[in-house]
Amino acid sequence: MDIQIDSREKARAITKIIDEFDRQGIGYYTSKLWVGDYMSLDNPRLIIDRKQSLTEVCGNLCQQHKRFKDELARAQERGIQMVILVEHSAHIKSIDDVEKWKNPRTRAWEKKIREQAGCGYDFPIEDAILLAKQYGFKVSAPPTPGPTLAKQMRTLSERYGVRWEFCSKQQTGKRIIEILRDGL
């Protein structure tokens, strides 16, 4: 099996993936892919788009929503099965687990609001928001919580046929090979 790696993948970020390809005797080369990050030359209708964390997925679904949806639509129009492989942790194995995920940006967001309101952590965040607004601060929307992210991921699966897979960073190279080889 030979794997094409998208040229926009940062070499530093995929060192362990390349090491796994070498360890398993998988041929690979780098060239720009139309969609996604990894494709087997044996099956160009199955492509993996690697995400480094759920935080990156949040960014794709919230801040870069149009660009991300456009990529998924391009894949669907061409009959390409898009698998989004999320490197997160051994604790996240499914979209159901994403529902329980606590966005790490929430703590910093709450801290900023409490500072603006001049109150401590024993003060309910809802009250701190009201107080910060009374003091004239503009309060930004909170970071995307796990249940909202999971719902968005399910919607993309239904609308574009996206398949979500999860693994730890140590398993990424192995999972890429398994998915592209077996279609699993």
Image (spheres, rainbow, N blue to C red):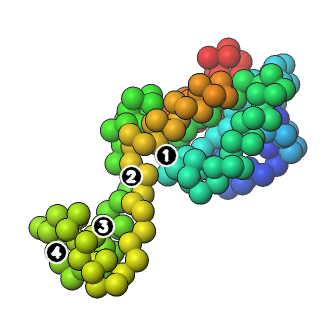
Q: Disc 2 designates what residue? A: 103
Q: CA distance from mark 1 to mark 2?
A: 8 Å
Please report contact status of discs 1 and 2: CB closer than 8 Å, yes or no.
yes
Residue under the image location 87 percent in, 43 percent down: 31
Quadrant the N terminus occupies: top right
Instruction: Label 3, secondary structure: give it.
Output: helix
Q: CA distance from mark 2 to mark 4?
A: 21 Å
List the single residue furthest toward the left: 122
List the single residue furthest toward the bottom: 135
Label 2: few (<14), some (14–19) or many (≥20) C-alpha neighbours in 10 Å: some
Residue under the image location 65 percent in, 24 percent down: 161
Considering only vertical position in the picture, is 116 above or below 139? below
The amino acid sitting under disc 1 is Leu
Residue 110 has which mark?
3
Q: Which of marks 2 and 1 precedes in the sequence? A: 1
Residue under the image location 56 percent in, 52 percent down: 62
Give the side of residue 49 with respect to residue 146, left or right. Answer: right
Label 3: few (<14), some (14–19) or many (≥20) C-alpha neighbours in 10 Å: some
Considering only vertical position in the picture, is 18 above or below 13? above
The amino acid sitting under disc 2 is Asn
Label 1: few (<14), some (14–19) or many (≥20) C-alpha neighbours in 10 Å: many
Q: Position of residue 154 (x, y in %)?
A: 52, 30
Considering only vertical position in the picture, is 66 above or below 125? above
Q: Position of residue 112 (x, y in %)?
A: 33, 75
Nearer the observer, 18 or 63: 63
Q: Which of marks 1 and 4 precedes in the sequence? A: 1
Total numbered labels: 4
Q: Disc 1 designates what residue? A: 54
